[in-house]
């Protein structure tokens, strides 16, 4: 996850307050963040992501998407028109998400790697998803349609695939608050299995920031909101590019 996070919104730290719609929110003000003006730096981080080296954007609709997936996608696109939400592109390689001017030296070397969640060329077989960011609410949502190659118990998505999409969504939320981050802890309670081919909404938010620690939570629900499939809490650590990854994670 951490390769996605090079300097995106680095330094934003304590520059915003969380105002979630009480109809859908699960929290109030984020502790550790000051209630200041909207986060221009966070908006810039979204722009940087959009200006990364142009590769295939896997977060665009394709023929495998169900009508439910398309309806939800179009609903969020509509909410993007007033700037409240921002669609997040998704490429096949971690480094492709980072503009050349922001890459660290090792990341400028092109390597034959693929994101775990984008490792299938055939549409619809694995992870089909699209993410949207609400900067003012410190909230990232993911529209997720699990394909047949993600099966665990017959007819249902494997719990590991659910964990992957939660980690990707909640991690994306942490990126736009703290920049370069890595998962330190992810705790998931599975409530109801996700049927293969169904569409669920993964809804993550920032709860608290303490120094380099970013605490987040997430729920996975059916698109009608009636079924809770999973809920999670997570801790992400903001990384210092001058230290090795092992040094930073062992110090926590």
Image (tube, rainbow, N blue to C red):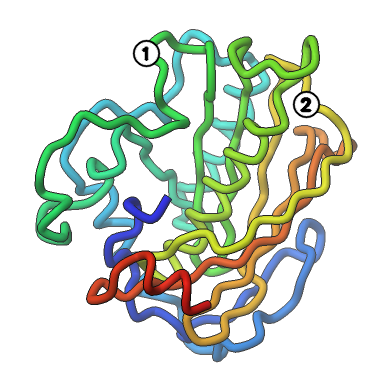
Q: Which mark is residue 176?
A: none
Spatial CA distance of label 2 from label 1 is 23 Å
Task: Answer whether labels 2 and 1 touch (C-beta < 8 Å).
Answer: no
**Picture coordinates of residue 100, whole percent (x, y):** 11, 52
**Picture coordinates of residue 244, whole percent (x, y):** 29, 68
Q: Image height check: is 126 above or below 200?
A: above
For numbered disc 1, what is the local secondary structure? loop
Residue matched to label 1: 121
How many residues crowd mark 1 within 10 Å: few (<14), some (14–19), many (20+)?
few
In this rendering, position of residue 244 left or right of residue 27:
left
**Residue 95 position by quadrant:** top left
Residue 107 vs residue 195, the one in the foreground: 107
Residue matched to label 2: 194
How many callouts does the rendering have? Answer: 2
**Residue 205 position by quadrant:** bottom right
How many residues crowd mark 2 within 10 Å: few (<14), some (14–19), many (20+)?
many
**Picture coordinates of residue 91, whole percent (x, y):** 32, 34
Q: Residue at x 43, y 62 (%)?
A: 175
Q: Residue at x 83, y 28 (%)?
A: 193
Mark toward the start of the polypeptide (2 vs 1): 1
Q: Residue at x 69, y 81 (%)?
A: 29
Residue 138 vs residue 247, the one in the foreground: 247
**Picture coordinates of residue 226, whole percent (x, y):** 89, 37
For numbered disc 2, what is the local secondary structure? loop
In this rendering, position of residue 99 left or right of residue 163:
left
Q: Residue at x 48, y 48 (%)?
A: 80
Q: Image height check: is 211 above or below 64?
A: below
Q: Image height check: is 151 above or below 159?
A: above
Residue 69 vs residue 4, the one in the foreground: 4
């Amino acid at each position: 996850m951490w390769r996605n996070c090079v300097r995106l919104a680095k330094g934003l730290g304590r520059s915003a307050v969380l105002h979630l719609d009480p109809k859908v929110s699960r929290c109030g003000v984020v502790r550790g963040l000051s209630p200041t003006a909207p986060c221009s730096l966070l908006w810039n981080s979204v722009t940087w992501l959009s200006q990364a080296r142009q590769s295939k954007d896997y977060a665009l609709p394709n023929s495998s998407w169900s009508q439910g997936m398309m309806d939800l996608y179009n609903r969020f696109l509509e909410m993007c028109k007033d700037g409240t939400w921002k669609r997040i592109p998704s490429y096949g390689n971690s480094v492709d998400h980072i503009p050349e001017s922001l890459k660290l030296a090792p990341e400028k070397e092109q390597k034959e790697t693929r994101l775990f969640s984008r490792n299938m060329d055939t549409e619809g077989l694995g992870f089909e998803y699209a993410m949207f960011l609400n900067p003012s609410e410190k909230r990232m949502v993911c529209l997720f349609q699990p394909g047949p190659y993600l099966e665990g118990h017959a007819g249902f998505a494997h719990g590991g695939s659910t964990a992957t999409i939660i980690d990707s969504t909640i991690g994306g939320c942490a990126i736009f608050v703290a920049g370069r981050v890595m998962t330190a802890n992810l705790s998931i309670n599975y409530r109801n299995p996700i049927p293969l081919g169904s569409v669920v909404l993964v809804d993550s938010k920032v709860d608290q920031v303490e120094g380099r620690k970013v605490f987040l939570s997430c729920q996975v629900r059916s698109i009608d909101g009636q079924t809770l499939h999973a809920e999670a809490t997570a801790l992400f650590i903001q990384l210092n590019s001058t230290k090795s990854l092992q040094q930073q994670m062992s110090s926590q």
